[in-house]
Image: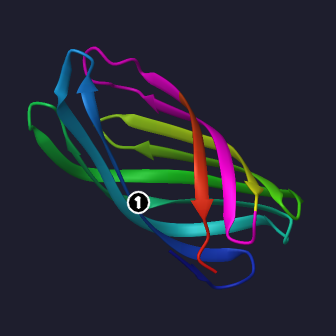
Amino acid sequence: MNRSFTDQFYLFGLGRVQYGIASENRPDDYVTDAFIGFGPGYRIINTPNLAWRVQAGPGVRFTEDADDVDETEVAGIASSRFFYRINQGVFVTNDTDILYSDANTRVTNDLGVSVSMTDTLSTRLSYFTDYNSDPAPGIENTDNTIKASLVYSFR
């Protein structure tokens, strides 16, 4: 959610939740990492075919580990959102988030290409990287995933 004040400056509100398996050794145990925050943002480039904006701010983070130990703490987030339209039917995005708190630092990056098939249907192929500075035992600190999506746009 964004509230623009000028063509460049805006205020953002952000909520996100990540929920997943704790480790390969404990496939029935899950972990939760949630954040809600707000702050200022700045549009570095803002054209119909090329856009790049950055934002950062404070918030609250809730984590729960596989042993049901939960923690709520002050956190901060810094984000970058990049969009480039190659032509009318193809565009590239690169979204990066850095989430910091005493529990750990989480960095995610999603680089994707979307191709329109119709006015309302498109395909998306993306490469997603998730880095955790303090992962659960048995989990690597970096996870890379290739994703393929079919996207329907409600216009």
In front of the other: 53 or 91: 91
> Residue 57 appears at what percent x and percent y?
47, 61
Q: Which residue is mark 1?
A: 58
Which three-letter amino acid code belongs to the residue tagged 1? Answer: Pro
Point out the residue furthest to the right here.
87
In front of the other: 119 or 68: 119
4 shown above or below 96: below
What stretch of residues is rendered in magenta?
118-144
> Residue 93 appears at what percent x and percent y?
71, 51
In percent of the image, x 60 and y 53: which residue is there? 150
Q: How many marks?
A: 1
- On the image, which quarter does residue 147 sit in? top right
Is 81 left, or right, of 139 in this rendering? right
- On the image, which quarter does residue 122 sit in? bottom right
101 shown above or below 25: below
Check disc 1 and report its element: helix, strand or loop.
strand
The C terminus lies in quadrant? bottom right
